[in-house]
Amino acid sequence: MNSENSGNYEFSAGLGSLQPSLTLGLTQKAKELIGRGEDVLSLCAGEPDYDTPEHIKQAAVQALAEGDTKYTPSSGRPDLRQAIAEKLEQENGIACRAGQVIVSPGAKFSVFAAIAVLCRPGDRVLVPSPYWLSYPEMIRAAGAEPVFVPTLAENDFCATVDCLESCLPERARMLILNTPSNPTGGIYQKRELERIAEFALRHDLMVVADEIYEKLIYEEGSGHISLAALGKDIAARTMTVNGFSKAYSMTGWRLGYQCAPLPVAKRIDALQSHTTSNPTSFAQAGALAALRGPQKSVEGMRLAFKERRDVIYDLLAEIPGVKVHKPGGAFYIFPDISSFGLDSMTFSERLLEEEKLAVVPGFPFGSNDHLRLSYAYGLDTIRRAVERLAAFCAKL
Ligand code: PMP
Ligand code: GLU
């Protein structure tokens, strides 16, 4: 008998019913095709194309050599938590003590843990749309329900308080705020954040502020603003999530963190102590070097991404039928392809088949009218990829 037919494969409604992440899946698929020597180009990757800076790698190598290979506290090494608390105070203006910092195996787990400890079955979570595709899955895994709040390109794809108010459901428990945003690159401005903070307080909402792209903001003079820096009251309901993946090009290291109000941090620590235990010991040594060491590489990467953003935006804007909004941050651009009459899934499948260009459809991010293109690639790849896209559009 086929072993797959012999067990009782009924799965739980929450964690057992998740669909695999399409961003990770498509990125791997494109890498495999390219690895087999196929003439495929990909703009799928949700990770910087740079290597981790050398001093960070060396710190981890040294930690390994010195035997830093044992369990650490489940919420991370005390010196790393302290360094993160100092970073959040000094750079972000968030009043944060080390005890509020929980280091996790990736910011993805940080978001998951915050939702998991706070959301009860039947709770509703406001999610501005388009959204990072993992949020709704994490919310459903907790037995809660996402409520999508539409946004407009002319508002930089940011939710307004008017729109949040009009979408507010009963049993609203939480708001997810992602600035700069994946997949749109949208950035919330200070005035809107202040209004959102008031809104969250008025409706007794907790907020996950996912700030993982904070270092990748391209307009001079418009730095990152952390929601939790806007006052003690909003800080007491905000979990500020960040990590090392994007700023230091450390996606494979799996290191993220959050600063949560102390009672929430304690619950998340308990969750980790029974699930992940600690983030990898020697990776934490690298993270400490990332925070304490030189920051030149971060700025170098930002400038390179800014140039790529300008190039990809100009090239896309020239394609007849494509509508594109200039993103202010992160490394994604989200062109509207609805004028071609194909939904985003069909469009991207045919684009791969006919022009050998892999992109992520907008559908899993909440819009079937868009594609998500990553510009975490060299300029030559970007130019050749957009040529293929233009050739495909010209055929439609
Ligand atoms: N939040 C957003 C918006 C992201 O795009 C990512 C990218 N994977 C993450 C969180 C998680 O990053 P990581 O788990 O690699 O720290
Ligand atoms: N966050 C990145 C992306 O959206 C990496 C993939 C993932 O974690 O889903 O592509």
Image (cartoon, helix red, strand yellow):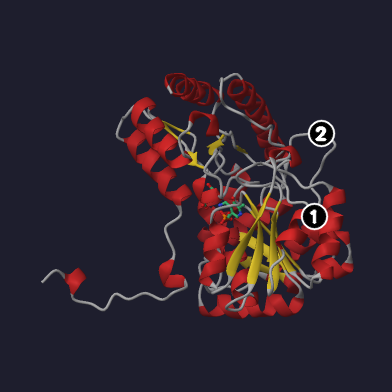
- Image coordinates of residue 66 in percent, x first then y, are 54, 62
Is 211 located above or below residue 381 in the figure?
A: below
Relative to 20, say whether 314 is above or below. Answer: above
Residue 187 disc label: none
Q: CA–CA distance between discs 1 and 2?
A: 28 Å
Give the amino acid at mark 1.
Answer: Asp
Residue tagged 2: 220
Report the side of 346 relative to 306 (left or right): left
Picture quadrant of residue 324: top right
Number of residues whose C-alpha sits closer than 10 Å to that of mark 1, classed few (under 14), some (14–19) or many (20 or more)? few
* Residue drawn at 59 percent across, 24 percent down: 316
Q: On residue 162, which mark appears?
A: 1
Q: Amino acid at mark 2?
A: Glu
> Does the rendering let one see residue 282?
no
Q: Position of residue 235 (x, y in %)?
A: 82, 67
Q: Secondary structure at mark 1?
A: helix
